[in-house]
Image (cartoon, grey):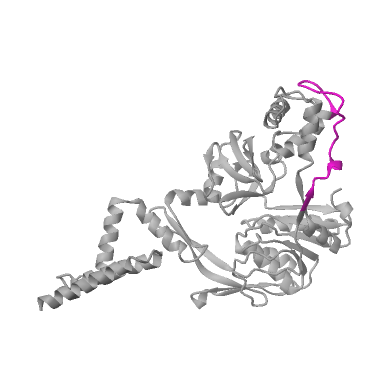
Amino acid sequence: MKFKRFFAAMLCFILLISQTAFAAADAEYEKIEQILNYASNLYIDDSVTSSDIWKSAVKKLIETNPDLANQFIKEAFESLDDYSEFYTAEEYKLFKKNIDHIVYGIGVIIQQKDDYVTVVNVLEGGAAEKAGVMEGDRIARVDGVDVKGESIDKVQDLVVGELDTEVTVTFLRGDREIEYTMKRGEVKGETVAYAVLEGDIAYLKIATFSADTDKEVDRALDELDKQGIKNIILDLRDNPGGYLDSAVNVASFFVPEGVIVSTVYRSEWENEVFYSKLKETRYKLAVLVNENTASAAEVLASAIQDSGAGILIGKKTYGKGVIQQMFEIWDGCAFKITTGKYFTRNGEDINGNGIKPDEDIANTTKKIDLSRYKVFDYTNKPSVGVNSVNTVAAKERLRILGYYQGEASDYFDNALFDAVCSFQEENGLFPYGVLDISTQKKIQEEFSLVDEKVDNQLIRAYGYFGGKPDNLYK
């Protein structure tokens, strides 16, 4: 009898050892589960279950490593889907602080893209625009702090601060690092910008859907109505979404009577259908979308497309058709969890699929158009204190190349002196800050290699209403 028990125990041991051959996480979990099952079945006290052993082990691990609790919960939520998330008390404070836009910042709209928080829009009149920050610049460091892999809330918290204080942000532009020191200013929380283009065609950009975006759109449309504008290019590119109610309200300005979107939850009594009561549409729309048009922005885009209120131009959208709710718990922590999903006006589930535009058009790049900039005359060599057309040409080019911040005036100031020195040093020239002929030629050579975006999507939308490309950038 003892021999049989010994043999059975050895067999169990051999089986357990064989499990260690699996390197994958699933295999490791199975191993733990099997060991705990064996332990509960063999332990002298038959009231102890494998679940009891699990609980005791986890409690002891947390006692000795308190951070493991948050890590475990984070992993648990992340295992559900790409959008459910657990926030520590500190992280939740940042989330609440940043949810409706920067108060004192540098004037950019940012988005998480892979390992970097990336600039998707530079706001007019902000410090970033004045410094020369460009769409697509990736934030690498803030005041010397490496932020690669950090969350958007963390990066935003480092960028914002007290009014009129300075922040130094290092950006990646292509493979090159560019550092700007900017003074924080009041950045209005506007999410909507508009302009009237040649040919009475309006351009209306919605950067994100905040609590007041619908009111901003309403005000913009009032101004366009006063000018008799009926054709609108609605730009939803790089719009990550936001408040669903806000997107629904905006849709009600454009979408004819009928369903805008349907939401479906675990409990049927929570399900809801949002309707437009618009009897007659007032505008003809060309809607710009791309792979970063997501969530609430997709609600608006799909409603316009499905109802025939306008056409979609660009690339297939992101495909986020699920709804999250935030729940705060007792110790200041919180979690965001997917509680529902939405279906478009035509009943489509776009989650993971995205919306295909009516016209699939990609943007391209080309060498920078040199004719739009002042030219070097290659005859005089301006230095600090001198006024010259060559100074303007240098500022324009060095700003785009990432060396100079500020306006492109004709006065050679100390900021340009520093920029010229930096450029000369990095390009094997004598770094003495004079804009000599060799430096002018080298600046022109480097500038001519710069690629600029060709917005084929906007050009097509403008042409859809009869606009001519040559008039678009007047």
Q: Nearer the viewer, residue 144 or 279?
A: 144
Tell me, yes or no, whether the highlighted magenta stretch contains residue 469: no
The magenta-colored residue range is 365-389
The image quarter in which residue 124 lies: top right
Spot occupied by residue 379 in the image (x, y as percentages of width and height):
87, 25
Of 65 and 440, the residue lying toward us: 440
For this view, does 129 lie left or right of residue 144?
Answer: right
Residue 219 quadrant = bottom right
x, y (%) of residue 22? 37, 66
Q: Quadrant of the N terminus?
A: bottom left
For this view, does 353 lie left or right of residue 385?
left
Q: Quadrant of residue 130?
A: top right
Q: Is residue 349 above or below residue 317?
A: below
30 with respect to 86 (left or right):
left
> What residue is rendered at 40% in x and 55% in y?
71
Q: Is residue 50 visible?
A: no
Q: Nearer the viewer, residue 138 or 235?
A: 138
Residue 379 is one of the magenta-drawn residues: yes
